[in-house]
Image (spheres, grey):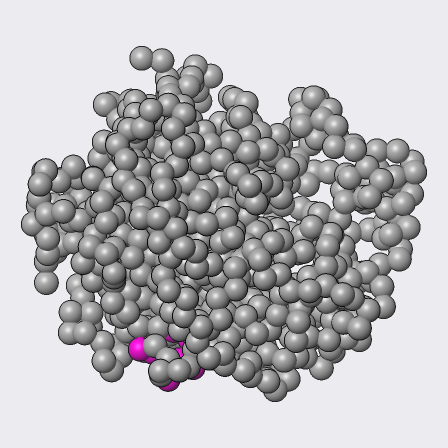
């Protein structure tokens, strides 16, 4: 065995002897060959051979529950309760001590940079004064490009990690890769053989996680582990240095997440976000394909022992006690419950993991939901990772029928308050509200106002809430739309959009879904904030938030008037594409026009800007500056690029990184540029053209005394920004 390549990480672990969209993705069981580990393949060599699938296991399905339709209580939703280790938890689990965690700086050891997910680096070699000299240091290619039925389905959204001398990453189809951080030379790759049919909406792997075993010897294999959850619903653990499976983890280094979920339907269940690891427990949720049926896989959250892969606990919100250790034989986790498709964050000291939950499997009809679904949908839920017990929850939408999932990873901060600080968590939302909560109790540090909705509509008025929570700390949301906000590239185009505005039901924020005519949902389900999340410069006390400002144009369609079969082969769900989502089990299907694009020119019906980036004072919540993000260079009517360099503010997806050098690095927009922004002024100081869309979060790290900025501009099929397998690192000239 070789010496551990990550001595700092190993040393901190030993010191503590007795831790997401647009799209969704799913898992299928495919027979294939043994996974392979390769060292530095020749240029152009493709992915290696795939892995054998597990035997199909078709569990008995559980009927969905039929909820009562009562009104939620008004007032702030943060409510604490004590948690304790579960019955049956292992002694090691119950008595788990906090580990020291690696720090951001020379490394980028977590998806959000540091354990607090601030996306802030103390590196300051690159500054506003020299950033215009930034150049490409190297470009690596994963050799993972769409083939066959994967064509038109790639949205990689990759954020690498940097640890020691290595950059660690996954590709769109979950190929795990290690490269040298200074040169880009490949160290190894591991291909788990994820089949194309596992792609539910887009081939996405936002990132991976690392964990160092505090009980392992310095030179033990798998002392430091690379943990990935895959599109075909597996958790894989590899030795981070050598890329070989950790054979004592699960079955030969793998856990099958399909276990106890019921029928396996390709495209309905997948993991695209990196797991959270806290107190030696790997915590993961999954994406459940939107818009198909009430009888869908469970949104259960599970915790696994990071050393052995054994189930530590399960939080099934429909049966939390009954299924804590997994369902009884012959039964499955509660079907169709709200899921966590995005990235969690955890507090190692408290032992809490914070889960940003989405909605139930049918987004736009709620009258059949259970009371547990009503309580936890679109809520931040704090779970005690040593027991699986709920500590507290904070709900951002009551009875959500707008698909306002919590898509952003929250951020942990010490929030300034009355000359002191409070351990807090920053929670962005798709509807634009940003909340700051006490992360020990879930209580909001600012008043939560109750917005009286203008209407509950005539589809299910008894189910919908008369009020909705809004933040008094900060919101990215703008004023309601008016007819004069309609836009067109020609008078005819603008006239069409104005007619459609008048035709639609729209009374403002939280306009309920309607079937008699289309309705306008503003903001749309892409935000506000989405999975790219916010960056927090903790030294300057500045939040950096990019956002979308664009509506959806939707309509409920009675089931008897549609013939939209549910997807059983990994195809598109219909949501966001202008097609129909069947919502089997509800009385209505749904037709969605995400971004409300005119069929005449393909341009949005509302006037730009469609997206921006904003700096917010952390302490006061006041806006420091706000700028549109994205130029018109790739945008234009009829899908023809205008090539105009003017900043118009485009739709964007992906987040930013802030540095001590006073810069914000971000791509995200549909103009396929990466840019450096002065955090003090909002001025763009540098740009570079990417080979495809930068719908991914950049990182920054140091190698051999040199600061690098890295991004994986894989493009995005929904954002129409092309496709690429490039990973690009920038640095100042040597």
In the rendered image, the vertical position of residue 135 relative to residue 377, given as above or below: above
Q: Residue visible at 45% across and 29% down?
A: 726
Q: Main secondary structure of the magenta part?
A: loop
Q: Nearer the viewer, residue 278 or 216?
A: 216
Could you tell whether 496 is left or right of 247 in the image? right
Could you tell whether 580 is left or right of 126 in the image? right
Q: Is residue 679 visible?
A: no
Q: Nearer the viewer, residue 651 or 589?
A: 589
Spot occupied by residue 313 in the image (x, y as percentages of width and height): 31, 72
Q: Nearer the viewer, residue 130 or 203?
A: 203
Q: Residue visible at 36% across and 83% down?
A: 328
- Residue 119 is drawn in which quadrant? top left
* Range covered by the magenta-colored residues: 315-325
Count the marks: how many?
Answer: 0
Spot occupied by residue 654 in the image (x, y as percentages of width and height): 51, 42
- Residue 518 is drawn in which quadrant? bottom right
Q: Residue visible at 18% across and 66% down?
A: 96
Q: Nearer the viewer, residue 493 or 600?
A: 600
Spot occupied by residue 676 in the image (x, y as percentages of width and height): 49, 27
Q: Is residue 316 magenta?
A: yes
Quarter of the picture holding the C terminus: top left
Quarter of the picture holding the N terminus: top left
In the rendered image, the vertical position of residue 355 relative to residue 656, given as above or below: below
Q: Is residue 609 visible?
A: yes
């Amino acid at each position: 065995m070789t010496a551990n390549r990550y001595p700092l990480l190993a040393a901190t672990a030993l010191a503590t002897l007795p831790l997401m969209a647009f799209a969704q993705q799913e898992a299928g069981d495919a027979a294939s060959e043994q996974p392979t580990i390769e060292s530095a393949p020749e240029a152009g060599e493709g992915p290696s051979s795939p892995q054998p699938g597990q035997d199909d296991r078709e569990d008995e399905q559980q009927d969905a529950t039929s909820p009562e339709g009562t009104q939620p209580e008004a007032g702030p939703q943060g409510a604490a309760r004590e948690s304790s280790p579960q019955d049956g938890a292992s002694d090691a689990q119950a008595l788990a001590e906090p580990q020291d965690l690696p720090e951001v700086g020379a490394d980028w050891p977590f998806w959000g940079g540091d354990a607090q997910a601030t996306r802030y680096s103390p590196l300051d070699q690159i500054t506003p004064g020299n950033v215009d000299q930034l150049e490409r240091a190297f470009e690596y290619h994963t050799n993972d490009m769409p083939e066959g039925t994967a064509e038109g389905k790639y949205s990689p959204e990759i954020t690498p990690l940097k640890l020691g001398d290595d950059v660690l990453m996954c590709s769109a189809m979950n190929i795990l890769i290690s490269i040298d951080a200074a040169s880009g030379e490949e160290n190894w790759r591991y291909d788990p053989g994820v089949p194309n049919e596992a792609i539910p909406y887009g081939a996405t792997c936002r990132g991976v996680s690392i964990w160092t075993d505090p009980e392992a010897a310095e030179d033990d294999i798998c002392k430091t582990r690379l943990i990935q959850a895959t599109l075909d619903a597996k958790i894989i653990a590899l030795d981070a240095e050598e890329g070989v499976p950790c054979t004592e983890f699960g079955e030969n280094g793998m856990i099958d997440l399909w276990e106890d979920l019921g029928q396996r339907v390709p495209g309905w269940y997948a993991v695209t976000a990196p797991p959270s690891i806290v107190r030696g427990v790997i915590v993961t949720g999954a994406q459940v394909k939107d818009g198909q049926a009430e009888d869908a896989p469970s949104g259960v959250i599970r915790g696994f022992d990071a050393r052995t892969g054994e189930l530590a606990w399960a939080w099934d919100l429909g049966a939390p006690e009954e299924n804590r250790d997994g369902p009884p034989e012959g039964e499955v986790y509660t079907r169709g419950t709200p899921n966590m498709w995005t990235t969690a964050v955890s507090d190692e000291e408290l032992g809490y993991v914070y889960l940003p939950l989405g909605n139930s499997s049918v987004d736009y009809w709620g009258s059949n939901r259970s009371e547990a679904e009503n309580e936890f949908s679109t809520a931040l839920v704090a779970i005690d990772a040593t027991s699986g017990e709920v500590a507290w929850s904070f709900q951002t939408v009551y009875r959500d029928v707008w698909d306002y999932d919590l898509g952003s990873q929250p951020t942990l901060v010490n929030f300034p308050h009355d000359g002191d600080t409070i351990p807090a968590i920053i929670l962005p939302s798709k509807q634009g509200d940003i909340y700051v909560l006490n992360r020990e109790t879930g209580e909001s540090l600012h008043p939560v106002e109750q917005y009286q909705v203008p209407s509950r509509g005539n589809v299910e008025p008894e189910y919908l809430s008369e009020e909705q929570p809004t933040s008094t700390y900060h919101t990215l949301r703008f004023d309601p739309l008016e007819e004069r906000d309609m836009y067109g590239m020609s008078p005819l185009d603008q006239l069409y959009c104005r007619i459609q505005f008048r035709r639609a039901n729209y009374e403002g924020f939280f306009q309920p879904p309607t079937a008699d005519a289309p309705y306008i949902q503003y903001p749309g389900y892409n935000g506000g904030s989405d999975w790219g999340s916010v960056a927090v410069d903790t030294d300057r006390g500045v939040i950096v938030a990019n956002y979308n400002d664009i509506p959806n144009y939707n309509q409920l369609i009675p089931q008897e008037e549609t013939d939209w079969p549910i997807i059983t082969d990994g195809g598109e769900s219909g949501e966001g594409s202008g097609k129909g989502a069947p919502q089997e089990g509800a009385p209505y299907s749904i037709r969605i026009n995400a971004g409300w694009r005119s069929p005449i020119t393909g341009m949005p019906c509302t006037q730009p800007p469609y997206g921006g980036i904003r700096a917010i004072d952390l302490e006061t919540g006041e806006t420091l500056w706000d700028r549109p993000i994205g130029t018109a260079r790739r945008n234009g009517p009829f899908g023809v690029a205008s090539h105009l360099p003017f900043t118009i503010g485009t739709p964007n997806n992906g987040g930013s990184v802030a540095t001590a050098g006073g810069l914000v690095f971000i791509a995200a927009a549909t103009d396929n540029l990466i840019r450096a922004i002065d955090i003090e002024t909002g001025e763009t100081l540098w740009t570079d053209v990417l080979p495809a869309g930068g719908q991914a979060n950049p990182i920054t790290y140091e190698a051999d005394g040199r600061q690098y900025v890295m991004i994986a501009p894989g493009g995005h099929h929904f954002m129409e920004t092309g496709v690429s397998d490039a990973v690009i690192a920038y640095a100042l000239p040597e």
